[in-house]
Image: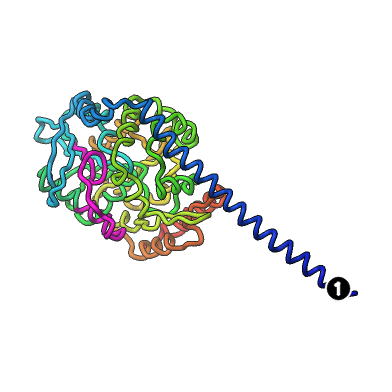
Amino acid sequence: MYEELLYLLNIVISIFFWTSIITFCLLIIIILLICSVIYFISNYLLEFVIDKVLINNSLRTDLLVKLTHNVKKYNLTERWIQDENNLDIHLVERLSNNDNGKNVVFIHGVCSCSLIYYNLINELPIENNYYTIDLPNFGISSFIDLEKLDNIDICYYYGDFMHNIITKELKLSKIVLVAHSLGGFFSTFMAHKYPELVEDFVLLNTVGFLPTLDIYGYYWSIFFYFGFPKNLLNSHISHFLFRPFTDTEFFNNGESKFWKLYLMNIDEKFQVSNIISRFISFGFFSSTWNTPIADLLYQLKCKIYLWYGKQDTIVPYHQGLILYDKKNKNHNYNEFSDSSHNPVYSTDFVKKFVKDVLDNKNVYDNNIKYSKKKIKKIKDIISNNTYSNSFLIFEITYNNIIKIYDEFKNISNLV
């Protein structure tokens, strides 16, 4: 009798086990099917609706012409230059007759182009020279295949590219460099490799100094890593999806509407997937920026201005507090409560900030010292996988950010 009961129990347990396995597999299949349907609807149906109904053919055909009109609207001029690889590079500038004016170079971020700076440049003092370019693989500059390069080589490619354009094509020997997001990440490599070129370095919500993104970083990683249907950029669905991540000004601004339309019509190979996804390690429950460069920042020999917005959901604003070295008189830190990830749309804030830099309102001692012990400790911190990721659960990511912040406070006295 006992053996029979044990036999029946084993049968019941086996049935329960295999039923659970089969149910789990069926759920996975159903989820995959749902995701496939969603992908199909978003990528094909929306493409048909938006492309055929909301965007007429003449607008698509005249897109680049409209970009040129936008340049003229802001009293700027544009020209095409070729780099040493014979790439056609789109350059927009506003030049001054003042021989003593400063040379200011603006670098855009990912999924962006020179367009974001036109309005800002138009409102800055006329006694300086201003330049902004579309980096290769962005905007309407040429495409270059970087797939065979590793992450660091990609960074130094962009650093060398910017240096060659600035020194050989623009003939500049000293610049004020203003860079946003991924542009600040790449520009740091140039400022580190060519310290004689950059006099003042303004970093606007720069990604990549630390491995952790903000509490929404895991979700942003999905978009950046896998990409998403470009036609969503100009749809009402994107307005709803991105409401938690950015301010309404982004969607109501006429220039940003043009910018979204512009991005939507650029070839797939030019944008997010081929560049930024290389720097994101993505798992089922966590993601991380896999090439953090906080140690490079501490070795720069120029004056550094860190800008971080409290409404930024991609780069944690308190990353600036972590990176800001109070003992380094060349460091300046600013945080702004009303700024999202792209502060350029808040033109008044950025205009005042850049003008203060150009007017030398903050004077620093040029004797820069950095600690080898501190840099080693920074490398140890950012390579510690126990709290370097952005997680699916907001609270875990936030706690990890706090741990990194506490670690950096502990190393402030290292020499």
Left or right of residue 147: residue 376: right
Compare residues 46 and 271 and report the one nearer the observer. 46
Write the residue at 45% across / 45% down: 220
Residue 192: quarter of image = bottom left
Compare residues 157 and 94 and report the one nearer the observer. 157
Q: Which residue is mark 1?
A: 4
Q: Position of residue 390 (x, y in %)?
A: 49, 52
Which residue occupies the extreme right position in the image? 1
Residue 134 is one of the magenta-drawn residues? yes
Which residue occupies the extreme bottom position in the image? 3
Dot 1: within a 10 Å radius of its alpha carbon, few (fewer than 14), some, or many (20 or more) residues? few
Left or right of residue 225: residue 11: right
Left or right of residue 174: residue 3: right
Quarter holding the C terminus is bottom left
Residue 81: quarter of image = top left
Residue 270: quarter of image = top left
Q: Tell me where the magenta segment starts and ends, as one range.
A: 131-160
Residue 128 visible in the displayed image: no
Q: Position of residue 134 (x, y in %)?
A: 23, 41
Q: Position of residue 2 (x, y in %)?
A: 88, 75
Q: How is the image coloured?
A: rainbow
Q: Position of residue 264 (x, y in %)?
A: 33, 35
Compare residues 204 and 141 and report the one nearer the observer. 141
Quarter holding the N terminus is bottom right
Q: Amino acid at mark 1?
A: Glu
Q: Element at badge 1?
A: helix
Residue 395 is one of the magenta-drawn residues? no
| Number of numbered callouts drawn | 1
Residue 313 visible in the displayed image: yes
